[in-house]
């Protein structure tokens, strides 16, 4: 039985004081719960937040990382640097990176290999645009993103990877996939992993849902057999909302 995983993507929000306050609130409210919990603050607040959450049951995540190792890459932050300051996992392939920053599957694949080499776990985000859903190619798009994103990733390395299915039309829009819609894609993602790796790998991999998951809809989504958690944006910025989701995952 897979345990659940709830991750908060803070995106480009907050200042240092409010990041510390949110982290402190979460450390208290998530204490004793038994799922896996991760928060991903903006780069510049990673260290401050780490000082608050270290030793708690919340792990530190980063929202992105460079596609190159250390060196002459102005403005970039490497996986090794993230690991060095307490980051355990990195979100890669988020649709905001794909569409705002023109990241493609090949670049994401390169980042995944570098993350794994640096000792980081990965949350690989995939998901379709509403135009894909309308023409019925959601599952094909997701399969392509998985195949390309996980190119040359071994089955052993796959144990360091979770997949977040995030329909792009549901991110930050207040529109959520219905539990049935989400479950159908999650089941197809799991079958892609069976085909690419093995039934065992498919059984073990955590597949999170993301896209306007909140304290009001999380319980139903998390009750679906192939939904193993959530990647939460907006609702991860409030202690009470995020905690409610964390509690559903801990049941
Ligand atoms: C996200 O950024 O991954 C996300 C799912 O955002 P939101 O929960 O705000 O839709």
Image (cartoon, grey):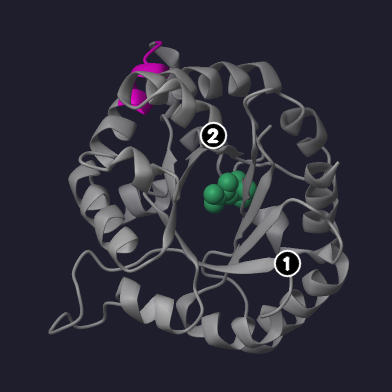
Front label number (1 vs 2)? 2
In which image quadrant can residue 216 be found? top right
Residue on which disc 1 sits? 57
Give the structural element (helix, strand or loop) at label 2.
helix
Q: Residue beneath label 2, please?
A: 204
Q: Earlier along the polypeptide chain: callout 1 or callout 2? A: 1
Q: Quadrant of the N terminus?
A: top right
In the image, residue 56 sits, relative to residue 136, either above or below, namely below
- Image: magenta residue range: 136-143
- Quarter of the image where one finds residue 80: bottom left
Q: Position of residue 212 (x, y in %)?
A: 65, 42
In x, y percent, where is residue 141? 33, 24
Q: Which x, y percent locates residue 119?
A: 38, 66
Judge left or right: residue 204 versus residue 192. right
Q: Nearer the viewer, residue 84 or 96?
A: 84
Would you place residue 246 above or below residue 49 in this image?
above
Answer yes or no: is residue 172 visible. Answer: no
Viewer-nearest residue: 68 or 176: 68
Q: Main SS of the magenta segment? A: helix
Q: Position of residue 53 (x, y in %)?
A: 69, 78
Q: Residue at x 44, y 14 (%)?
A: 134
Identify the residue shown where x is 45% and y is 24%. 189
Classify mark 1: residues with Cα within 10 Å, few (<14), some (14-19) or many (20+). Answer: some
Give left or right: position of 81 versus 7: left
Q: Residue at x 78, y 35 (%)?
A: 217
Q: Secondary structure at mark 1?
A: loop
Label 2: how many Cα within 10 Å (few below 14, some 14–19, many 20+): some
Q: Residue at x 27, y 31 (%)?
A: 147
State yes or no: residue 137 in magenta. Answer: yes
């Amino acid at each position: 039985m897979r345990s659940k995983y709830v991750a908060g993507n803070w995106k480009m929000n907050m200042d240092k004081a409010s990041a510390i306050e949110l982290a402190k609130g979460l450390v208290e409210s998530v204490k004793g719960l038994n799922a896996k919990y991760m928060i991903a603050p903006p780069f510049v607040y990673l260290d401050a937040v780490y000082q608050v959450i270290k030793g708690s049951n919340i792990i530190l995540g980063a929202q992105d990382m460079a596609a190159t190792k250390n060196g002459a890459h102005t403005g970039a932050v490497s996986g090794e640097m993230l690991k060095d300051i307490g980051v355990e996992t990195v979100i890669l392939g988020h649709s905001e990176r794909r569409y705002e920053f023109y990241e493609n599957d090949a670049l994401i694949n390169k980042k995944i290999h570098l993350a794994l080499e640096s000792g980081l776990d990965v949350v690989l985000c995939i998901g379709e645009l509403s135009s894909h859903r309308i023409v019925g190619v959601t599952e094909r798009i997701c399969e392509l993103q998985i195949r390309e994103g996980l190119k040359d990733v071994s089955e052993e390395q796959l144990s360091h990877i979770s997949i977040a299915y995030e329909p792009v039309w549901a991110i930050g829009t207040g529109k959520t996939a219905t539990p049935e819609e989400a479950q159908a894609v999650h089941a197809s993602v799991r079958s892609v992993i069976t085909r690419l790796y093995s039934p065992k790998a498919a059984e073990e991999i955590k597949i999170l849902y993301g896209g306007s998951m909140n304290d009001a809809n999380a319980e139903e989504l998390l009750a679906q057999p192939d939904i193993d958690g959530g990647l939460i944006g907006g609702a991860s910025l409030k202690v009470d909302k995020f905690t409610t989701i964390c509690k559903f995952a801990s049941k």
